[in-house]
Image (cartoon, grey):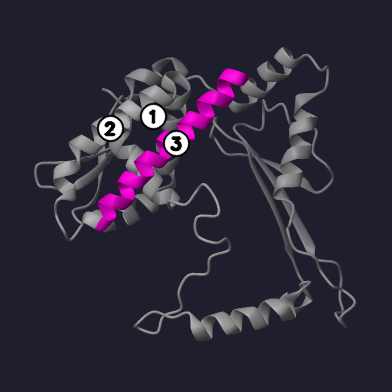
Amino acid sequence: DFAGRPFQPLREVHIERYIQEKAAQEGTGEDPANAWLQRLRHLAAAFWNWEKGRGIMGDDPMVIRVLGVPTVEDSIFQGKQESGEELVTTNYPLALSALHTEHGLPYIALAGYTDFLQAYENYIQTNRDREGRVLPIRLFPEGAVEESVDTLYLRFAQGLILGHIYIDEQQDFYFRAASHHVGEDGAQAATRLSRDLQAAIEALGEHPNFLRQIEYDAKRFTEQYGFQGVSQEVEKAKERWASYREDEAFRPIWDKLFQAMDQWARVSRQDTATHLQA
């Protein structure tokens, strides 16, 4: 199984063990749990400000802060929470999660709300498609950031390359987990996405677990084989799927998927360089 074989040695990867091992290598003597908690709190902090002096009555907003760890019982973050901060189990060993929400004040109390409302009303009056639907709002100019290709297309493209996504004899798209993602029984049950390419991409987006598996394997593949390995597999995949791109009805979608493949190769070059420097 191509998708599973390269990652077999990495089945025991655990985010908290990684944090501890990296801290031991750096030898700073600092508690890595506290350092990461501070980092997560900063990243998850609300990005807005309240203007409570605008005639708004009532108490302060209710603040919810949750940190998701693989397992609470044996977590290095156990007992290090601040007052009002909750630790929960995610059963996902590859990442930490942080949630910070505030509730209880009306949206008119948001700083800059009047300016935002005016800008939004101007936008919806002048940005509509032929059917009169409002076009999506871009927070950044197109091309201003590296992630120019939609993440869902990137994951679908990586799934095609890594063997997670394939077409059966009836020309239906399926998702199949790699061997190190399946249960104890070893079963690799496939999930049908759709026969239509666009619908298959959208169906993949409805399965967050599938997206996480593809992201995980793509990262591990980059770490193990580097830019050269990713580039070789990208070219092989583009040759393998070239005949499907010949269909005029689906060519724009395949073009976008091929662009996503190339994007993965570009990003892998940067990741490989960073890894070598480290």
Q: Amino acid at mark 2?
A: Glu
How many residues crowd around disc 3 within 10 Å: few (fewer than 14), some, or many (20 or more)?
some
Task: Tell me where residue 249 appears, x and y as whole percent.
Answer: 17, 61
Q: What residue did someone put label 3 on?
A: 266
The residue that label 1 is drawn on is 181
Amino acid type at image mark 3: Arg
Q: Nearer the viewer, residue 18 or 159?
A: 159
Question: Height in image: 44 above or below 249?
Answer: above
Q: Which residues are magenta?
A: 252-278
The relative height of residue 270 versus residue 241 in the rendered view (above or below) is: above
Q: Is residue 184 visible?
A: no
As drawn, 5 above or below 111:
above
The residue depicted at 36 percent of the width and 19 percent of the height is 6
- Which residue shows up at 51% across the image and 25% down it? 272
Quadrant of the image for the C terminus? top right
Across and down, in percent, residue 33 comes to 75, 28
Comparing marks 2 and 1, which lies closer to the viewer? 2
Tell me which amino acid carries mark 1.
His
Mark 2 sits on what residue?
Answer: 235
Residue 21 place in picture, x, y as percent: 67, 16
For image coordinates 73% across by 31% down, the residue present is 77
- N-terminal-most mark, 3 or 1: 1
Q: Which mark is in front, 3 or 1?
A: 3
Q: Quadrant of residue 275?
A: top right
Residue 261 is inside the magenta segment: yes
Query: How many neighbours does mark 1 have within 10 angstroms: few (below 14), some (14-19), or many (20 or more)?
Result: some
Whether residue 52 appears in magenta in the rendering, the answer is: no
